[in-house]
Amino acid sequence: MRHDGYMRPAFAQGKKTAVAKLLELRRQAQRDKEPRMVLRIQGILMSLDGHTAGEIANHLKVHRSTVPLWIDQWNRYGKEGLLEGHRSGRPTGLSQEERERLCDILDSGPVAYGLETGIWTSPLVRYIIEEEFGLRYHAGHVRKLLRQLGYSMQRPTTRLVQADAEQHRKWVRYTYPNLKKTPKAKGR
């Protein structure tokens, strides 16, 4: 702060090599479909070109208090300062130990847990989390949690276990086509 009570405008610090690195980082963020990262990088590039925080905020359509934060993060931490930081909000819920215990339950399978189904579904995992840990998760958050834990969604394949292959072939070739609707004749 200056002695006359006014704040000096904050500008990003960097050399010509920083611009080249930022341009490459912006291309990578665009490829990764990270629009907020692209926005922050664009703000820093504009600041390096001498634009004020107010001009940058107007141009990028962000709140005027946001740009000085980006600049400060860039000046302090460089490229890492542009990365998505910690956001306040609801705590994660499951501790690391609880996550490990959930993984053990999931790895054992639903039958070992005492369920009659052979596959895990998001509603089932949600039920397990509520039963075991007393936490209520939205089904969408359960899927997100499962991805974080390294699980992937599997689509079961369906096949007739006791089907006669010859009977199946005949049905597909002769019966099924006759079940399809045929277009009506055109006319009034």
Image (cartoon, rainbow, N blue to C red):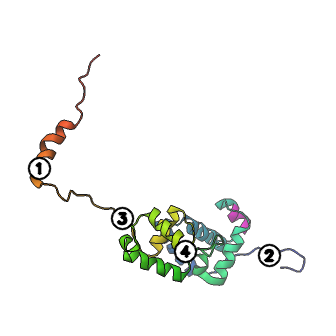
Q: Mark 2 belongs to which amino acid?
A: Arg
Earlier residue among tags 4 and 2: 2
Label number found at residue 133? 4
Sequence order check, earlier mark of 4 and 3: 3
Q: Residue furthest top?
A: 188
Question: In this picture, which residue range is highlighted in magenta?
Answer: 51-57
- In terms of depth relative to the viewer, which is nearer, 165 or 56? 165
Which residue, given by chain and number where applicable, does mark 2 sit on?
A: 8
Near mark 1 (Cα within 10 A), the count class, few <14, some 14-19 or many ≥20, is few
Within 10 Å of disc 4 (Cα), the crowding (few <14, some 14-19, many 20+) is some
Residue 52 covered by magenta stretch: yes
* Quadrant assignment for the N terminus: bottom right
**Figure check: 61 above or below 101:** above
The residue beneath circle 3 is 117
Q: Is 86 in the magenta?
A: no
Going from the N terminus, do you reach mark 1 or mark 4 first?
A: 4
Query: What's the CA distance linking mark 1 and mark 3?
Result: 29 Å
**Could you tell me which secondary element the residue under label 1 belongs to?**
helix
Foreground disc of the pair 1, 3: 3
Q: Amino acid at mark 3?
A: Thr
The reply to whether dot 4 and dot 3 touch (C-beta < 8 Å) is no
